[in-house]
Image (tube, grey):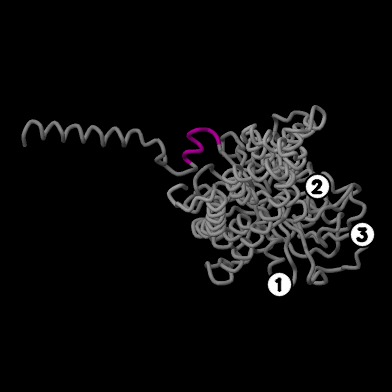
């Protein structure tokens, strides 16, 4: 071996050792339980949007998180000899994030289902709940099966959702929050709500909602458990031992009584989760669901853009030719809708206006996206109008055209030709932003992807299918716009574009 070769080998070895030492993303040695005890802290994930009484911000001190699950985790951590630290994660992503290793355990009204048993380890139950059906007070419905052909609201990835899917004639309507389903029940947007008794008692069937009633008997029972990664059996045993000790010395009962959650169900034997799987493959039925959702996305996009274009034109004309007051009003509209998130605007239209005028989900979605993109289109058209040479207006005046005729016959046609490329870009952006309407219960393409990911227990295949669908929608539209742009430019040369 020559001296140069030896030097190269030594440098390579040093590099390998350095890379090995710098691999901060590599998992730490030892089990998760050992790591928890070594750092003196157990990290558990929950979603503050779940609200009272699970895990939520203290109204008296928003920097402090409270809830019955906070108290239970504090007690478990104390018995493990460590501190408890809650981390915020979206509820629908708790299990995938747990599998990724983002935190130690997941605990936030996580229900013991057969599907979850196959993905992660589950602790012993810490609460037994009942599935309760809520309907309007004047409804003659007495059972879930009487809602055949109706819309029933629930939360995604829950036992209640599984129950609704067992009845093909019922249309499940999925929500992210606890309060919204009952508001929509009052507004006649849905015909029933199936959720846990904790949620029903606090958000539905109470004095704040006299027009809603909860039916008896309960539809089914389930249990809340702690989610643990598959290879963390030692941690599972430690958590089970802590929960068993809390039951034995009465601490668990004391916590549940503190939050007015203790009832006779807690003394009964907890129900056993079904062990059969309902996992699906990406078959023809699921493909058709994606195609149908793509149709909803395309319909939303087209209708919203057809609303945005005339709104944008009116606003642009008002800003350029409207004078002080009219131009100021147009600018205020543009700044309002461009300066606030479209998600907020959808919430205001769908939920905020509901006590005064109840919009349907599709109507609110089209209106919200159309009003928002109208503000962006206004600036596109205003820039195009200002880009037209002043000589065009002077020539029109010399020909005796009135200001309105000049605008309609001379300026607008030329400005629309200039605005076509950014309009195409906005249309594609609107196509993608339509995914936001899932927050008001519209099942479009992205929402269908998330539902499929839960059914298939994986995000890769549904994600690829969703991306393909979006490309299939956007590329032909972009190509059509390019051809139209070329035709309007009267330039047949493809290299010009």
Cα–Cα span, label 3 and label 1: 25 Å
Cα–Cα span, label 2 and label 3: 21 Å
Who is closer to the viewer here, 32 or 140? 140
Element at label 1: loop
Mark 1 or mark 3, which is nearer the start of the sequence?
3
Who is closer to the viewer here, 228 or 403? 403
Nearer the camera: disc 2 or disc 1: 2
The residue located at (92%, 59%) in the rendering is: 137
Residue 426 position in % (x across, y down): 61, 45
Nearer the camera: disc 2 or disc 3: 2
Element at label 3: loop
Whether residue 37 appears in magenta in the rendering, the answer is: yes
Cα–Cα span, label 2 and label 1: 28 Å
Residue 43 position in % (x across, y down): 57, 39
Q: What label does residue 168 carry, if any?
A: 1
Mark 3 or mark 2, which is nearer the start of the sequence?
3
Is residue 268 visible to the viewer in this orientation of the structure? Answer: yes
The residue located at (73%, 30%) in the rendering is: 62
Q: Main secondary structure of the magenta part?
A: helix
Element at label 2: helix
Residue 482 position in % (x across, y down): 53, 52
The local crowd at label 2, few if under 14, some if 14 to 19, many if 20 or more residues have their Cα within 10 Å, is many
Give the extent of the magenta segment. 34-41
Q: Residue furthest front?
A: 399
| Label pair 2/3, CB-CB below 8 angstroms | no
Residue 179 position in % (x across, y down): 79, 48
The residue located at (82%, 58%) in the rendering is: 189
Who is closer to the viewer here, 61 or 220? 61
Residue annotated with mark 3: 137
Mark 1 or mark 2, which is nearer the start of the sequence?
1
Q: Residue furthest left?
A: 2
Residue annotated with mark 2: 351
């Amino acid at each position: 071996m020559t001296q140069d070769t030896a030097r190269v080998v030594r440098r390579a070895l040093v590099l390998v050792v350095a890379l090995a030492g710098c691999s901060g993303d590599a998992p730490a040695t030892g089990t998760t339980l050992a790591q928890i005890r070594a750092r003196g802290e157990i990290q558990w994930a929950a979603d503050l949007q779940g609200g009272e009484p699970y895990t939520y911000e203290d109204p008296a001190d928003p920097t402090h998180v409270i809830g019955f699950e906070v108290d239970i985790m504090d007690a478990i951590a104390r018995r493990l000899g460590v501190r408890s630290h809650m981390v915020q994660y979206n509820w629908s992503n708790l299990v995938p994030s747990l599998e990724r290793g983002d935190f130690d355990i997941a605990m936030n009204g996580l229900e013991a289902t057969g599907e979850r048993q196959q993905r992660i380890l589950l602790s012993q139950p810490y609460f037994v709940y009942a599935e309760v059906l809520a309907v309007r007070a004047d409804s003659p419905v007495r059972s879930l099966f009487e809602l055949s052909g109706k819309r029933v609201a629930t939360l995604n990835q829950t036992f209640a959702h599984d129950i609704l899917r067992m009845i093909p004639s019922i249309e499940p309507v999925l929500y992210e929050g606890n309060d919204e389903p009952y508001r929509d029940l009052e507004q006649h947007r849905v015909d029933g709500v199936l959720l846990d008794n904790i949620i029903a008692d606090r958000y539905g069937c109470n004095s704040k909602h006299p027009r809603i009633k909860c039916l008896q008997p309960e539809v089914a029972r389930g249990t809340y458990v702690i989610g643990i990664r598959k290879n963390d059996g030692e941690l599972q045993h430690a958590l089970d031992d802590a929960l068993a000790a809390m039951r034995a010395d009465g601490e668990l009962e004391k916590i549940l009584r503190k939050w007015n959650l203790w009832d006779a169900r807690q003394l009964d034997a907890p129900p056993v989760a079904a062990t059969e799987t309902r996992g699906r493959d990406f078959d023809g039925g699921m493909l058709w669901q994606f195609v149908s959702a793509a149709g909803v996305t395309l319909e939303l996009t087209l209708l919203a853009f057809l609303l945005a274009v005339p709104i944008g034109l009116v606003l642009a004309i008002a800003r350029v030719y409207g004078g002080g007051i009219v131009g100021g009003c147009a600018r205020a509209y543009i700044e309002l809708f461009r300066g606030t998130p479209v998600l907020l605007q959808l919430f205001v239209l769908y939920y905020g206006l509901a006590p005064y005028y109840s919009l349907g989900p599709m109507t609110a979605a089209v209106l919200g996206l159309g009003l928002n993109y109208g503000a962006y289109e206004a600036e596109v058209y205003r820039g195009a109008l200002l880009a037209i040479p002043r000589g065009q207006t002077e020539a029109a005046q010399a020909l005796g055209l009135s200001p309105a005729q000049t605008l309609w016959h001379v300026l607008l046609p030329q400005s629309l030709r200039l605005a076509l490329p950014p309009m195409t870009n906005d249309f594609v952006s609107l196509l993608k932003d339509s995914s936001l309407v899932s927050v008001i219960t519209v099942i479009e393409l992205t929402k269908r992807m998330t539902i499929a990911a839960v059914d298939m227990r994986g995000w890769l295949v549904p994600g690829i299918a969703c991306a393909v669908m979006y490309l299939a929608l956007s590329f032909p539209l972009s190509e059509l716009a390019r051809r139209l742009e070329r035709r309007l430019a009267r330039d047949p040369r493809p290299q010009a574009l």
